[in-house]
Image (cartoon, rainbow, N blue to C red):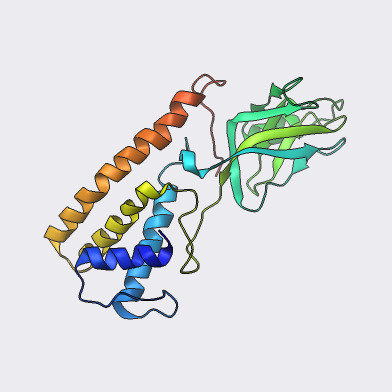
Amino acid sequence: MTYLQLVQAAIKRSGAREELPSTTVGATGIVADFCTWVADSWEELQLKHEDPPWFWKLHVDQTIALVAGTDNYNLHADHETVWWPTTTVYTVAKTDEVPLKFIEYFYWRSVYDTRTGAQQRPQYITQAPSGVLYVYPVPDQTYTLRFDAVNDLHLFVADATVPESLPEKYHQYLVWDAVARYASHHEDGAKLADATAKTKPYLKRLVNQQVKFIELNSGHLRGKPKSSIY
């Protein structure tokens, strides 16, 4: 569903005596409130899990070209961080491709960034608070860094915006969570309990299929990584 459709569905499910809007642009009154509740629900859902992240927040199989003499690299603007168990480096994919070990930024800063070593194939990777990636040792030639990225926070900005990457079968969670926010705002305890109960199966299924899936599939990769330094 689009942002507009989510707002329309939430208003309908809430029982509010309000004509369904044809746009979220310039919304006022209760319609504006529903726009906010749907948008807040989407933002907060994305933030519920960081380590491991929601599986649907991963942008898989990304690459960055590493060049000789350069140890720092920017992520794509839409990416927040890296799912560290997936980082590898190679000159020829699947021929000499090997994992990179993630190290905490401040350990890298105090131990590795304080020395000048021979340039060679990178073995370690970290991320600075600015979001910039650093590799060590400094590359001695061209390599390719391969990884799955964690998408940055996605916002609703227009009627046709859809919840990025979230499978549509879970969109009803956003609808019922917005209804719960409406009920809380109006101190309607019965409706709040009902709407909250309706969100739980969606959230439970999300956790089972989108979080535990990653835990099961990444458990064998160099132990449990720390996926965020923020």
The reply, left or right, for residue 71 in relation to residue 213 is right
Q: Is residue 103 above or below residue 38?
A: above
Front-most of 202 and 48? 202
The reply, left or right, for residue 127 in relation to residue 225 is right
Tell me where residue 145 appears, x and y as whole percent: 73, 34
Name the residue rendered at 54%, 36% in the picture. 227
Name the residue rendered at 35%, 33% in the picture. 208
Tell me where residue 57 appears, x and y as whole percent: 50, 44
- Image quadrant of residue 54? top left
Question: How many numbered discs, if any?
Answer: 0
Front-most of 91 and 133? 91
Q: Is residue 37 above or below residue 167?
A: below
Name the residue rendered at 56%, 40% in the picture. 229
Front-most of 143 and 25? 25
- Image quadrant of residue 68? top right
Quadrant where the C terminus sits is: top right
Tell me where residue 76 appears, x and y as whole percent: 67, 49
- Image quadrant of residue 188? bottom left
> Which residue in the rendered view is the most extreme toward the left?
190
Quadrant where the N terminus sits is: bottom left
Name the residue rendered at 69%, 41% in the picture. 133
Q: Is residue 185 above or below residue 192?
A: below
Tell me where residue 98 appears, x and y as whole percent: 70, 21
Front-most of 129 and 32? 32
